[in-house]
Amino acid sequence: MSARKPLRNFAMLWGVCVLACLAIFLWDRANGDFGCPSITDNDSAYGVESWRWWPPGKRCTYDFGSSGIAGRVIHGPSIAGTVVALVLVLWLAAMVITAKRRTRPVEQHTPPSPI
């Protein structure tokens, strides 16, 4: 068996994790503004969805106003998206560093001749 097999398995697992994150991203984008639930349980005022790259995730903006008082409530992405993004980037960096170290030629130490 090759010594590279564990690295290949970690690379495949990393790819699966990236694809899962991409699927979640596409699901969020496909839901549109209905991805932003109403602010209270008894109204139908859905928020307006927008995407943020950092921290990654959707941001819901709710505009409201009554009796001449207007306001805006913003719910940003959770810290979980940031943690997942950082883990995936660090994981990729660790795999690249490990792969470079494994491809580096190992110096052969030859014992001095007894002469």
Image (cartoon, rainbow, N blue to C red):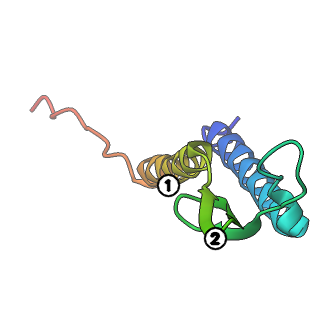
Residue at 62% from the left image edge and 58% from the top image edge: 73
Q: Quadrant of residue 109?
A: top left
Query: Where 48 falls versus 13 (above or below)?
Result: below
Q: Position of residue 35 (x, y in %)?
A: 84, 58
Looking at the image, which residue sits at the far front? 67
- From the image, tell me which residue sits under label 2: 68
Q: Is residue 106 left or right of residue 60?
A: left
- From the image, tell me which residue sits under label 1: 96
Looking at the image, which residue sits at the far top? 114
Which residue is at the front of the view, 55 or 36?
Answer: 36
- The amino acid marked with disc number 2 is Gly
Would you call the spot at circle 2 few (<14 residues within 10 Å), some (14-19), or many (20 or more)? Answer: few
Which mark is nearer the camera, 1 or 2? 2
Query: Where 55 falls versus 5 (above or below)?
Result: below
- How far is disc 1 from disc 2 in space, using C-alphas? 58 Å
Q: Is residue 94 left or right of residue 39?
A: left
Q: Tell which circle, 1 or 2, labels the residue nearer the N-terminal end.
A: 2
Q: Is residue 26 left or right of residue 80?
A: right
- The amino acid marked with disc number 1 is Val
Q: Position of residue 46 (x, y in %)?
A: 83, 61
Which residue is at the front of the view, 53 or 60?
Answer: 60
Q: Position of residue 103 (x, y in %)?
A: 47, 54
Residue at 62% from the left image edge and 53% from the top image edge: 77
